[in-house]
Image (cartoon, rainbow, N blue to C red):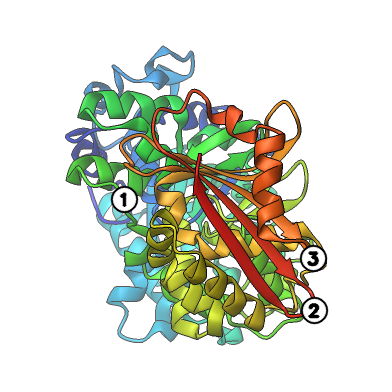
Amino acid sequence: MGIYLNPGNEGFRIIRNSTYVDKTGLIDYINSTIGNAANRMTCFSRPRRFGKSFAAKMLCAYYDKSCDSHKLFEDLEIAQKESYEEHLNQYDVIYLDITYFISISQDIKHIRSDIQTGVIQELREQYGDLIAEDEKILPHALADVAKKTGGKFIVIIDEWDALFREAKDDDALQKEYVQLLRGLFKGGPATDQTIAAAYMTGILPIKKYGTQSAMTDFIEFTMLNPDELVRYVGFTEDEVRQLCREYQMDFNELRVWYDGYSLDGIHHIYNPNSVMKALQKKNVRSYWTMSETFEDLKKYIGMNFDGLKDAVIAMLGGQRQQVDAIYFQNDLTSLASRDNVLALLIHLGYLAYDSERGEAYIPNAEVSDAFKLAVRDIGWGAIGEALANSDRLLAATVAGDCAVVSQALDKIHESSTSVLKYNDENSLSCAVTIAYYTARRFYEIVRELPTGKGFADLAFIPRRNANKPALLVELKYNRDADSAIRQIHEKRYEGALKDYQGNLLLVGVNYDKETKKHSCVIEEA
């Protein structure tokens, strides 16, 4: 048992000692690729904190022939599959955690030689004189062992793209690293005789890494196209419901905070790391902003590309944005447009992606909090101020303070005319949603709520245990706030919330194009 060659099953054993959501169906997929030249190379990319390392340790434990993992898997989904016994603990496993190599390397420029030296040393300890004493090239060493033993390797690489993120401006180092990967996985007789299957995971896909995108033998699964691996991206809704029953937590609270990713037919994908932290700590809140990627969010949304700030402001206002992700180069230095940045944020998990409509959006309350703090830190004038003060604004609304509501909307208008052109009620709706940004913690915010006699512009429906009044908001453009209130009564919009048990406030908002001012009327239903 080594660090790189046959690391054993202790990593997965530790995972199984705590609450484990069964994702072993992924093993059955990898089993189906073994010995298949067309698809034995798998790259499955997804954001940080979405279970990538858990999956890598699971695969190591299953394939590693230096240990017996029957007891770890016998009660899991994979044990019911035909492929289970055929491949369980049958292979030499090469496990490479690229972030580990970066952390222990005295000089990151030597990482290619560090990887080869470390693995070859363990191969020699296991297979002695099967490898020439002067051999320093890892693909050659693996080929020698495979040829002389008749066995093949399973190669598992965790955080495969860490070098591109850590040394994003060092083209020469990146080229050396990619050459190593090509040597391992380039295809042809050498790879056929050496590699039974390969699994790489990281944040970014690999196909378009500039001129270094020749690892075409890999089948890719991404946040844009997870395909048949979609249920292994994160937790499904059924899985989170079951966890909430076990931990006696309110499912609806976790849904608000961690749901929102919609991928290839599964419309409710949850951030697994945040779900588990919330359950273990008995505290539903944002864990995403504790991640190092929070600094990335601030950097990328602050880039000066035409239309990027407008797109972010629109999404803060609850809208979705069309994004063309096809031409994203999958690196951190070739960002050249609004769509490049939005595509990167999808891969980082800060935006969700509706593949059917080609639209990006902010998925949930946790990520909303991250955007709020990022906008505050980079300084976007009244937009940042409005987000920071949205809790105060909600309190003023409940108290019936119309002046505060009007002034808050005035400030948003002053700093966001490029996107909130105020030529229709849709723009006004966006401004109102931004002004009440943090209200989504306490409310389900519904645009165009059907009422039977039309649609209420915005409905703020309190979440369970929120202890807040419901709000019906009607918006007018170049009219007056009183007419908005009258429309609510005349069309009986409040009837849409007849089953709501609690207080109901009616809020009428008007924007005057000439004065560029907002007026507001608030009354109890």
Percent coordinates x, y for residue 24 in the rendering: 41, 29
Gap between marks 1 and 3, in whole Å?
82 Å
Gap between marks 2 and 3, in whole Å?
8 Å
Whether residue 187 is visible, yes or no, is: no
Q: Quadrant of residue 184?
A: bottom right
Whether residue 455 is visible, yes or no, is: yes
Most foreground residue, 252 or 233:
252
* For marks 2 and 3 on the same chain, the one whose residue lies earlier in the sequence: 3
Percent coordinates x, y for residue 95 in the rendering: 38, 52
Labels 2 and 3 touching (C-beta < 8 A) = yes
Left or right position of 93 against 485:
left
Residue at point 44%, 85% (across, down):
109
Q: Is residue 87 above or below residue 192?
A: above
Q: Amino acid at mark 2?
A: Glu
Most foreground residue, 245 or 136:
245
Q: Is residue 40 above or below residue 304?
A: above
Gap between marks 1 and 2, in whole Å?
83 Å
Q: Which residue matches tag 1?
A: 127
* For marks 1 and 2 on the same chain, the one whose residue lies earlier in the sequence: 1
Q: Which residue matches tag 3?
A: 478
Q: Residues within 10 Å of mark 2 (few under 14, many from 20)?
A: few
Q: Amino acid at mark 3?
A: Asn
Q: Which residue matches tag 2?
A: 514
Most foreground residue, 448 or 345:
448
